[in-house]
Image (tube, rainbow, N blue to C red):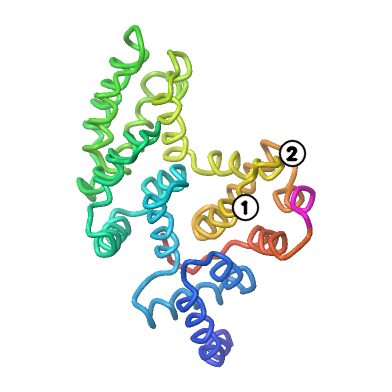
Amino acid sequence: MTTRILASSSHSFENECKEIHDSWGRLNSLIPAFASRTQIECWQIRETYKGMYGEDLITLLQKKSMEAIQQDDTNYKALVEIFVGRKSSHIALINQAYQSKYKRQLDQDIINIEPPHRYQKILGALATSHKAHKADVSQHIAKCDARRFYETGEGSPGAIDEGVVLEIFTKRSIAQLKLTFSFYKHIYGHDYTKSITKGNSGDFEDALKMVITCLCNPPNYYAKMFASIKGKTADRGTLARVMVSRAEIDLAEIQRVFKVKYGIELTEAIRESIPSGDYRDILLTLASKTITAPSRTC
């Protein structure tokens, strides 16, 4: 039954994909396309778009965020989320697209951002780490790196040794870094982020703590981000972007953590905090479902 429905709807999917492609760059074209569809239809739109244009919609969304480096309002947290949350193969495609469009290397543009920003150094290290990607992770390396983090952090007086932190972030894959911080907690009895809080906290330490939270505990990181809908300074574009990009990964878990932390369902928080209109309807639709395709991972 499902196959027949999808087959009969393929023409409308193609039309919708063409509209998205023709108006690419406007988030309000992409989000309704996902928000108004069922789980299977969302997956089918992605597959249809990929078949027509050879690119994945979610990866394209990440590319648009990368292009923010060329603008004055660079969204550094969005860039961190992309480097931390995407596979190295995806980052390689984004790097290729960036170089093709701007004739420059993405990691070099990050290093040369002016004026300097507190996320800049870690972003540069994360960009380089994907080039050193290895499929396998090493427990031995993870234990050694965890020890180096301790010895140059809470195990020594003064501030964290930025050089050591950036060296490790540059040389290790995302999977290897996750294992390292897991071993750190196992060996020393607490998260590495707690050791950052105990010491002298500056811009680098604050940025490092945010990056590690995004790396090791994404549901908690994004639940805290969603809490901004209660404030007057909520970034509406960010809320919608995160809902779309995390829908296939862990949106259901993010919503569970959100309820535990703030005592309210995310959908109720949206109804209470966002004025009625198309934007609120889109957020509510995205929050009410998880866009997942069977046997797929991002």
| Secondary structure that dominates the magenta span | helix
The local secondary structure at tag 1 comes to helix
Position in image of residue 268 (x %, y %): 77, 50
Image location (x, y in percent) of residue 160? 34, 18
Q: Secondary structure at mark 2?
A: loop
Determine whether 288 is above or below 117 in the image.
Answer: below
Count the marks: how many?
2
Asked which quadrant contains residue 186, the reply is top left
Mark 2 burial class by Cα count in 10 Å: few <14, some 14-19, many 20+: few
Q: Nearer the viewer, residue 292 or 196?
A: 196
Q: Is residue 116 one of those drawn in magenta?
A: no
Q: Give me the disc on residue 68.
A: none
* Position above or below: 209 against 62: above
Residue 225 is left or right of residue 197, and the answer is: right
Q: Please name whichever residue, 141 or 43, is drawn nearer the observer in this view of the structure.
A: 43
Mark closer to the observer (2, 1): 1
- Which residue is label 1 attached to? 236
Give the position of the C terminus as an image quadrant: bottom left
- Report the quarter where the N terminus lies: bottom right
Distance Cα–Cα, label 2 vs label 1: 22 Å
Q: Residue at x 22, y 59 (%)?
A: 103
Residue 57 place in picture, x, y as percent: 44, 69
Q: Which residue range is magenta in the image? A: 271-275
The residue under the point 43% across, 20% down is 202
Residue type, numbered disc 2: Gly
Q: Residue 20 appears at what percent x and percent y?
A: 50, 76
Q: Amino acid at mark 1?
A: Arg
Residue tagged 2: 263
Q: Are marks 2 and 1 in contact (CB under 8 Å)?
A: no
Left or right of residue 194: residue 220 = right
Residue at x 27% of width, y 43% of height = 173
